[in-house]
Amino acid sequence: MKTLTWLIASTAFCASPALADMLDLEKDELTLGFIKLTDMAPLAVAYENGYFEDEGLFVTLEAQANWKVLLDGVIDGQLDGAHMLAGQPLAATIGYGTEAHIVTPFSMDLNGNGITVSNDIWEQMKPHIPLMEDGRPQHPISASALTPVVADYKDQGIPFKMGMVFPVSTHNYELRYWLAAGGLQPGYYSPEDVSGQIGADVFLSVTPPPQMPSTMEAGTIFGYCVGEPWNQQAVFKGIGVPVITDYELWKNNPEKVFGLSAEFVEENPNTTLALTKALIRAAIWLDADNNANRAEAVGILSRSEYVGADEAVIANSMTGTFEYEEGDIRDVPDFNVFFRHNATYPYYSDAIWYLTQMRRWGQIATAQTDAWFHDTAKSVYRPDIYLQAARMLVDDNQANEADFPWDSDGYKAPTPAADIIDGIAYDGRSPNAYLDSLPIGLKGDQTLSGSDIVN
């Protein structure tokens, strides 16, 4: 496996603009993990632009085989931190799957995912999709257009299979959200059956991100939800059509985070601050001047040690556009957001949304109080660390005072109904009321007994 390491000569410290405020690091040699997706960009940029070096950090970046290997590496200390699915620190902390206290001081991005179906499924969906005046499909496309296709497969006795990247991934919850909003049941989890397919109309299973296109091409799955560049790869290969982006599903939804063990943060508070500072600077650079640096970022990400996809494929979504079908390129300037809209601030309300989806689909098997949701979010998301790092950058003239939510209580304003595919608003301050508002999914005191929902 190829790794990347900063070799910092002593003279480099003399030239560093941050020398005057250099933190007294508890640990300066770090190994950080990532998965080959474009939203790992803050790590690559912090490395390539010397932001880790400015903080006195000797960093090695290592691509990981899958999300479980990555999480296990952080837990056992082989990795000091990693690009993570936002659901991973939460699930680990509450003991779903692997149990360990993981925290995040930094949210890596907003949006960045899509749902793609095979060409064959797309042709079957098209008669149920409204068209614009120019004949192109009208977006966003509801999963209701997939409902008759799934029904036809069920009549033929063929399970309708789709892929997502991990049971606690944003992709799993986004795909489930889209399906449920269109009236399709994506299935439940229970302590006895962790397949997530209890009572399902559409059967979801795990496929690693880079393998999504080839798995769909082989016919093992009929579609998938994944981050870039693996939706655009299906378009370039001519094997599939993205039907919706997560920006259309839920405008400016939270995506990946940077995760560290709580033990690491406790033992290395200054190193944690230094890491957070470097990542904030990388995020600022990625969104600066209306994405003026994105072309350079695409060149970096296309290298084999990072994402390893063609520049043209990565650029299709990283530079403010998204291609649905060949030639159907539309402007989606906020498809990838790394700093705008306070993207890097770890909001408690973002964490709570993930927890509500875990409860909705049975990964959290029993009812929890609103206080439990809030307390769990606050044990994992650390805006206090983030704002301390941001303050240091502002004082060092490396960031602008106005770009950070200094007075935030950790909760975003409610997401309005118009910004979500099912027209149901989300308020992180009221998690159980939100769950009650969703027509499909567990709510209140409901539990699963076998395949039956018990009130």
Image (cartoon, helix red, strand yellow):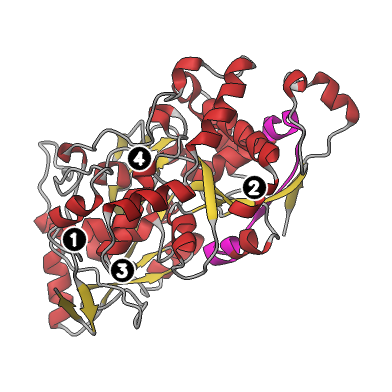
The front one of 188 and 385 is 385
Screen quadrant of the N terminus:
bottom right
Answer few, some or many: residues within 10 Å of disc 3's Cα (few below 14, many 20 plus, some between 14 and 19): many
Name the residue carrying label 2: 266
Q: Quadrant of residue 157?
A: bottom left
Residue kind at label 1, given as amino acid type: Ala
Could you tell me which residue is drawn at 23 percent across and 56 percent down?
178
Q: Nearer the viewer, mark 1 or mark 4?
A: 1
**Residue 435 in the image: above or below residue 15:** below
x and y percent of residue 173 in the render? 32, 58
Q: Is residue 116 visible?
A: no
Could you tell me which residue is drawn at 16 percent across and 66 percent down?
184
Of the residues under marks 3 and 4, which one precedes in the sequence?
3
Of the residues under marks 3 and 1, which one precedes in the sequence?
1
Any mark on residue 222, and which? Answer: 3
Q: Are marks 1 and 4 in contact (CB under 8 Å)?
A: no
Residue kind at label 3, given as amino acid type: Phe
Any mark on residue 322, and which? Answer: 4
Residue kind at label 4, given as amino acid type: Phe
